[in-house]
Amino acid sequence: MITLLQLGTELGSEFFSASSGTFRAIEISGVHVSELEDPTTYLDGGELLLTTGMPFAASAEDSQAYMRRLQDKQVRALGLGLGPWLHSVPDHVVEACQLANIELGIVPDQIPFQNISRAYWRLAARDQASDLMGSLGTQTALARAAVRPDAINAVVRGLAEALNGWAAYLSADALPATYYPASTASFLDELRSESMRFRRNGVPSASTFEIQGHEVALYPILSGTKIHGYLGIGAGRKPTKADRQIIMTVCTLLSLRSRQRELSASTHQALSSATTKLLLHGQQEAARLIGEEAGLGQIPPQVRILLYRKGPSTDGTTALQAIASLDRSSGLPDISRALRDCKLHYEQGTTSYLILSEPAERSLVAEPAAQQTAISLASMAGDQFNSPAPEVRAILSQALPLAEIPSTLSALRRALDSVPVGTLASGTADFDSSADTWVKTLQEYARADLFSAVSSYLRHRGRWEEASRELAIHRNSLRHRITVAQELLGANLDDPDVAAALWLALRRAQKKAHHGS
């Protein structure tokens, strides 16, 4: 904004203070010329009003009434042009201006009022250019800050300093707030509350409101229609056009940063899924290579496999958060830390698979940090406290080497079918209880003699040539029958636990048939 002091300095002898001193540094919003008795209808307030004094200079009473009207309109500066009407300034005009707290300036005879207007706009153009250059410099600095590792911290601090106020960024995914300066922490709870109100009302636009007597602006950080977070601002001055440009630049930078994080997370998730799938299928070396390239870290030699299923009304994020708090079977460890650190996650159909690290020297115990994260998630969820409990069931294997993962999965999947909702069960396999059912299934299969094929395969410990010779069939036919049997049973016959339990059940069935005959 242009001040009366700047204008007087620019014009010199063409416009000077009626007092012996200099003008005060009061802001003026424009220059207006009028000879009306009441010009306030055409004023917004804040202008410098130029006049020859015709409406008021004839008497002290008229002068005081005129100045009161200007005061009510918040006009704080008057330029009196000397010439045909007044050759000098009457004392009662000076006194009326002082009573109304209106700064009085003199425009000498023969000086056009247009000179005052032109000088004002020259200053305004310089001020705007200066603001623009300053804004461009600030925006450039903020853009550079946006590519730093601590981008959000740097951008938020830069914005707060540029506005001589404070700024805070609230992430929509429950990450800790980023703010500057430290005193901004006292506003965070109310900012979160306001942001949750916006979320319930759909995609918001910017909003202004008051917090603890301070005017606050809140801007959504969007990528399309998805809300990534909110930028709260408390400026230390009335924002200028250049300030608003800086704010819009910061909103754009934060949106781009959030989009980059979203794409990075999507890529990381795809690589995690591929690595996990390879491990589930026994491809350990390929999984290690992809995991190293993806930055997933070293895959430990000893792991636990977690399988879970969620209900149709439960989203994936909510399901993961709920697993650590499910009712656990006796003897199962707390897996809060392992879930938090887990980088290997794969989803197939309705079942999700997590490969959790199995520490060598310590149990998986929940940490305060994990509990604090859960609290943060709950506080950001707002109304979700009243939502139904997540429909999740899960099963956790015993610690096992990577090579045993494929042979364990079928038993874990079968066991998961019987786990009640809201429970995390132990994956210790009870194959004996299922083996008799498997035998019955083999016996009832009508299209081929799967009972004899499986019996011979297990008797010869998976040696195709010997088993096929005993059955008097081609080994490819035997391979086909074993494949059909495994699919039918949902079990891997090369799993030692499965093979042992099934072999004993087959022997029992054979003995029963022999005695029956």
Image (cartoon, rainbow, N blue to C red):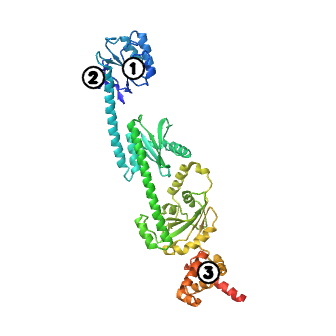
Q: The C terminus is located in which quarter?
A: bottom right
Going by the image, does 361 lie left or right of 512? left
Vertical relation: 41 (above or below) 251: above
- Find out whether the residues at labels 2 and 1 contact each other: C-beta distance under 8 Å: no
Q: Which residue is mark 2?
A: 12
> Which marked residue is nearer to the observer: mark 3 or mark 2?
2
In percent of width and height, residue 11 lies at 28, 23
Name the foreground residue: 99 vs 127.
127
The amino acid pointed to by label 2 is Gly
Q: Which residue is mark 1?
A: 102
In percent of width and height, residue 88 lies at 32, 12
For marks 2 and 1 on the same chain, the one whose residue lies earlier in the sequence: 2
In percent of width and height, residue 217 lies at 47, 39
Residues at marks 1 and 3, CA–CA distance in whole angstroms: 103 Å
The amino acid pointed to by label 1 is Ile
Residues at marks 3 and 2, CA–CA distance in whole angstroms: 107 Å
For marks 1 and 3 on the same chain, the one whose residue lies earlier in the sequence: 1
User: Which secondary structure, mark 1?
Assistant: loop
Going by the image, does 441 lie left or right of 398? right
Residues at marks 2 and 1, CA–CA distance in whole angstroms: 20 Å
Going by the image, does 285 lie left or right of 328? left
The amino acid pointed to by label 3 is Leu
